[in-house]
Image: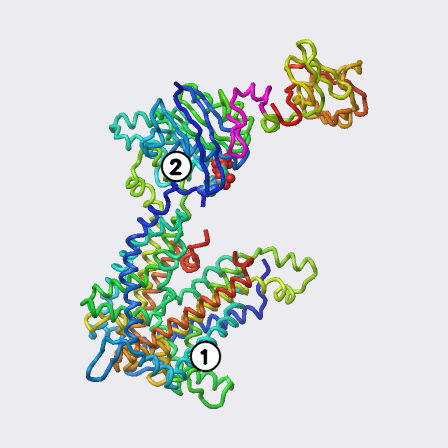
Amino acid sequence: MSFLVLRELKKTYGDFVAVEALSLDVQRGEFISLLGPSGCGKTTTLQMVAGFVEPTGGAILLDGHDLVAMKPSRRGLGVVFQSYALFPHMTAAENVAFGLEMQKVGRAERDERVRNALELVGLGGFAERYPRRMSGGQQQRVALARALVIRPHVLLLDEPLSNLDAKLREEMQIELRQIQRTVGTTTILVTHDQSEAMALSDRIVVMNGGRVEQIAAPQEAYERPATPFVAGFLGKTNELSGTARVEGGETRVVIADGRWASRRPIDGAVIASVRPEKIAFADCAAGRLTGLVKTRIFQGNHWLYRIETLAGQVFVIRQNGGEPMPAENDKVGLTWRPEDMALRAADGRR
Amino acid sequence: MTRNGPLALLYHALFVVFMLAPIVIVCIVAFTPEGYLSLPTHGLSLRWFRTIAQYPEFIRAFWVSIWLGALSSAIALSLSVPAALAIARYRFKGRDALATLFMSPLMIPPVVLGIAFLRFFSLVGLGGTFVGLVLSHVVIVFPFALRLTLASAVGMDRAIEQAAVSLGASDWTVFRRVTLPLILPGLVSGWALAFIQSFDEVTMTVFVAAPGTETLPVRMFLYIQDNIDPLVTSVSASVIALTAIALVALDRLYGLERLLAGRGINEP
Amino acid sequence: MSTPASDNAAPSAWLLSLPALVFFAVIVIVPLIMTVVLSFHDWGEYKGIQPVFILKNWIEIWSDPYFGEMFARTFRIAILVTLITAVFGAPEAYILNRMRAPWRGIFVLVLLGPLLISIVARTLGWALLFGGNSGVVNAALMKLGVISSPIPFMFTETGVIIALAHVLMPFMVLSVWAALQRVDPQIENAAASLGAGHFTTLRRVIFPQIVPGVLSGGIIVFALSASAFATPAIIGGRRLKVAATLAYDEFLNTLNWPLGAAVATLLLVCLVVTIVGANRLIERRYAEVFR
Ligand SMILES: Nc1ncnc2c1ncn2[C@@H]1O[C@H](COP(=O)(O)OP(=O)(O)O)[C@@H](O)[C@H]1O
Ligand SMILES: [Mg+2]
């Protein structure tokens, strides 16, 4: 059995469904992200695990024990809040020591562990500082140390990096991942930033409107999004209408003047979803989707193209490798590997 | 922001004169060397301040007021803290009604409260006692205590307490180690504001106080009813001076406008 | 508010409010009900209070023109005081709001501070200023040539109204000022950039936005002046009675508690009706401004 199990977890406020039948198995040591737009129920889910919101239905099991029946103060989970929620009247060291005091850890051991925790997050010299004398990044680290020092069964992080500026956020992502690897604590991170989720997690849970859209490893969710929502949320994608027909163990896909052979058995009108960076330029041979370059934007390490085709607008991203690239108003052919194309029926069936 | 024109400043000056005139005249007349009410035209004298010492009823009333204010403010505050936490944090049926009830002593004319207390206390055997006085003042100052505790409870990040809970703290520990220290500045100001309100209250107290338990403003009021003389003027000047000191201190500590303007219940 | 702690919010909320609630029930609600009941009891000079249910006191208040006159005076004073504080307090709040850093803080202290100074002391100041016919105010006015013979202030409605307007003025300034602080400071510049003159800006842009402040301040001032006691008692003396001082007399001089209770109950009812009614009216009219 998995370490942490959420089974059919549900939360309603009156008629409003904040979280709908969420099921999730988390392995020991795993780093999971709950990813979705604002208001999709991520925080609510996390708070149900932490015990600050009571589920309307479903179960939460930690190592086989029912968590819902347990008081929040007995759950032994480390929580890092978006606002950090540091105790403003205590120094960094006192903040970190608080949880150990509650566990009645002896003085000597407590000091030792507090020191180690602060070292772990790179704040060795800041033990006696008060939170309001620290930068956002430093406060963030204190909050992390405070949650980790109690050796929590699970670490819960609610948008911990969203109050940091872009550069610091990237640094903290790397550091957070490193710390989590070192300590090995099972972690659930809530975020609305898809790159953060993909950078940090073993698996991501993409949520929308209280429902789970997909649970998968980052790369899988990116390459093979289960729903159009996931495809759109995890980055730019092209959605192209076409038709598919199964013919002798193979599926023939036709998109305007382009043709592909796919292994996916699907018939009738389809939508093909292709990431812009998976599309390559080629000559305008027969059976190739062709189009006219409308705009071309240079973005440093890559080019962004907008191509007008018979199937509609297509975005293409090409690495800037130094070779000559098509110019505006050039006629080009577009190719991609069949496995880079996610197919689904146009009427909404999977 | 544009400047005020000369006309506006003239208006402002007249307004300030109007607001300060009665207070200033009390302070001036209190220093008269004469035996009757008059502006001190031939030098200043402290004789009327010294005379206060010969009127033990003013001294006693002063101490009654001090103890009454301290005690009733403390009681009001300890009742208001849990109520403020409830009102600040929960949305529940009856919340607005509860808030209205707790703020109602501001709306009920103090005469009506005084009459109600007089009747009630004389029936239950607390008539004219210090206990009755304290109970009645708890009512009077409760809205002020509640307003400031509410403001600090509302302003507090809920996640800070949740953090303490997640670290294993019991409800009581959370309150003692986290909530209380964080709302303490609000509590201190709430106590101070409540104390001043209690110290100034006269209308309701006139009904509840008996000769042994008269507060300073009641004593002053009853004295003035009989006769206005330099003695009661110097007592008033002393009260004004004390209040002014408290006021400046409170302004430094908490900000006077925040203290007076906060409505609290429905405004975040 | 963000999230409540849990969903069984109501029980914990009531539990937390319980001490204060019990206190209010016993020390406020019960005595108030007893006062209303008392107003229906009988009283006689020799028999004292008789716990019976009669309408004697209420009929007396209704039929004796003395009470009608007294209540009319009470509310006349309250209305005039409200008007005076609004007319003079609102411009001052506007001026105060336009002041710069050190001055604003100083004058806030000067103008709002008196709120915390003993009412008895402040009223005593007016008694000294009015001082019969030879007071400071009359002397100054005569020297300035505004009047030729002294105006009687002591023991008159004029005196009571002036003193009450002074005592309650801070509430109006505070209330209007609070409304002004919600006004975007750039809005006057915006109006000016659209070609509005200073007076037009005041009338069309600023004034409508402070009306809610004036009204809510007006409610406070009206309620407090209608129930004022110490100021009318000192400045008005023994003859110029208002509701509060009359109730006081019945209780502590005549000892006719039931009649005093009836006067107090009537005052309470009148005020509650006025305040609630005015609040409703304002909220409906200015719902979008108040929010
Ligand atoms: N206490 C509450 N009462 C009613 N609705 C709530 C409450 N808490 C959250 N919600 C609603 O539930 C939805 C999910 O909220 P939340 O979990 O905070 O979203 P997010 O994914 O941004 O963290 C939101 O639409 C929010 O408005
Ligand atoms: Mg959230």
The residue under label 2 is A52
Subunit that carries the residue with mark 2:
A
Residue B231 visible somewhere in the drawing: no
Question: Does mark 2 have its CB less than 8 Å from ligand 1?
Answer: no
Q: How far apart in space, not on screen, are marks 1 and 2 (Cα)?
A: 56 Å
Q: Where is residue B247 in the image (x, y as percent from the top left)?
A: 37, 61
**Does A14 sit left or right of A332 as displayed?**
left
Q: Give the range drawn in magenta.
A: A205-226
Residue B180 visible somewhere in the drawing: yes
Q: Which residue is drawn at 39% across and 78% down?
A: C126
**Does C66 sit left or right of A332 as displayed?**
left
Query: In the rendered structure, does residue A215 fall within the stretch colored magenta?
Result: yes
Looking at the picture, tell me which residue is in the foreground, B7 or B228.
B228
Task: Name above or below for residue C134 compared with residue A176.
Answer: below
Question: Does mark 1 have its CB less than 8 Å from ligand 1?
Answer: no
Q: Which amino acid does label 2 sit on?
A: Phe
**Tag 1 secondary structure:** helix
Q: Position of residue C170 (x, y in %)?
A: 44, 67
Task: Name above or below for residue B158 compared with residue A310.
Answer: below
Mark 1 on the same chain as mark 2: no
Query: In the rendered structure, does residue A242 fall within the stretch colored magenta?
Result: no
Q: What residue type is labelled 1?
A: Arg
Q: Report the number of numbered marks.
A: 2
Looking at the picture, tell me which residue is in the foreground, C74 or A319.
C74
Subunit that carries the residue with mark 1:
C
Task: Name above or below for residue B233 compared with residue A195.
Answer: below
Task: Name above or below for residue B220 compared with residue A6.
Answer: below
Can you tell which mark lies on residue C76?
1
Looking at the picture, tell me which residue is in the foreground, A197 or C190.
A197
Question: Is disc 1 surrounded by few (<14), some (14 to 19) or many (20+) residues within 10 Å?
Answer: some
